[in-house]
Image (spheres, rainbow, N blue to C red):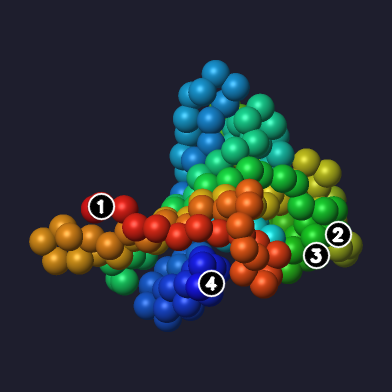
Amino acid sequence: MTHDPFPLFDSWFAEARETELNDSNAMTIATADASGQPAARMVLLKGHDRSGFVFYTNQESRKAADIAANPQAAILFHWKSLRRQIRIEGPLSTVSDETADAYFATRSRDSQLGAWASDQSRPLDSRATFEARYDEMKAHFEGKDVTRPPHWSGYRLTPQRFEFWQDREHRLHERRVFVRASNGASDGNGDDWTEGMLYP
């Protein structure tokens, strides 16, 4: 029997794209720093395949500092309209420069300029300061393509564990778990997974 979490993720994600009014690709990412202090925030999934789940950020941000110190994370999708959630855990790695450049080129020009103007997660004395920096970047790149900042890139979470949670009546929820195995029969896609269920 093939135990493969990816088709199930793709199916649920496709349904969410149809039912969620805003940002069906929004996910919580939880990280921890070197001391174990956890932090969680919302980001947007910008790509996924069997190699992992990709998001982008300023590499001088708090989340990037956490990842540098402890490159393990958990992501969570919650789709209220479907009464479903998916938890995914695994290590993080930086995407290639080519991948980051290709995605950055698809962002709106204003978002590209914002990536240059923002010292993400650092103290800001006023909104006016940030807006002035944005205007400076706008003038700097006038008539030119906005290149990707060297401190801005993406991360890929390589899944080691999935949990699919489906709401049921009377809190008798359904929880399916897939864990990447170090040994076992291949699913034909180069992945080895074991599947089980959890009590709600």
Which tag, 2 or 1, sits closer to the chain's start? 2
The residues bearing labels 4 and 3 have C-alpha atoms spaced at a distance of 34 Å
Can residue 127 be seen at all in this image of the molecule? no
Question: Which of the numbered marks, if any, corresponds to residue 102?
Answer: 3
**Residue at the farthest right position:** 144
Q: Name the residue under label 4.
A: 2
Question: Which of the numbered marks, if any, corresponds to residue 199?
Answer: 1
Q: Label 2 crowding class (10 Å Cα cut-off): few <14, some 14-19, many 20+?
A: few
Residue 76: percent from the left, percent from the top?
45, 53
Which tag, 1 or 3, sits closer to the chain's start? 3
Q: Helix or strand or loop: what does disc 3 sit on?
A: helix
Q: Helix or strand or loop: what does disc 1 sit on?
A: loop
Q: Label 4 crowding class (10 Å Cα cut-off): few <14, some 14-19, many 20+?
A: few
Q: Mark 2 points at which residue?
A: 98
Residue sitting at 47 percent across and 30 percent down? 38
Labelled pair 4, 3 in contact (Cβ < 8 Å): no
Name which quarter of the figure residue 169 lies in. Answer: bottom left
Residue type at the position of mark 2: Glu
Residue type at the position of mark 1: Tyr
Name which quarter of the figure residue 119 lies in. Answer: top right
Residue type at the position of mark 4: Thr
Residue 114: percent from the left, percent from the top?
68, 51
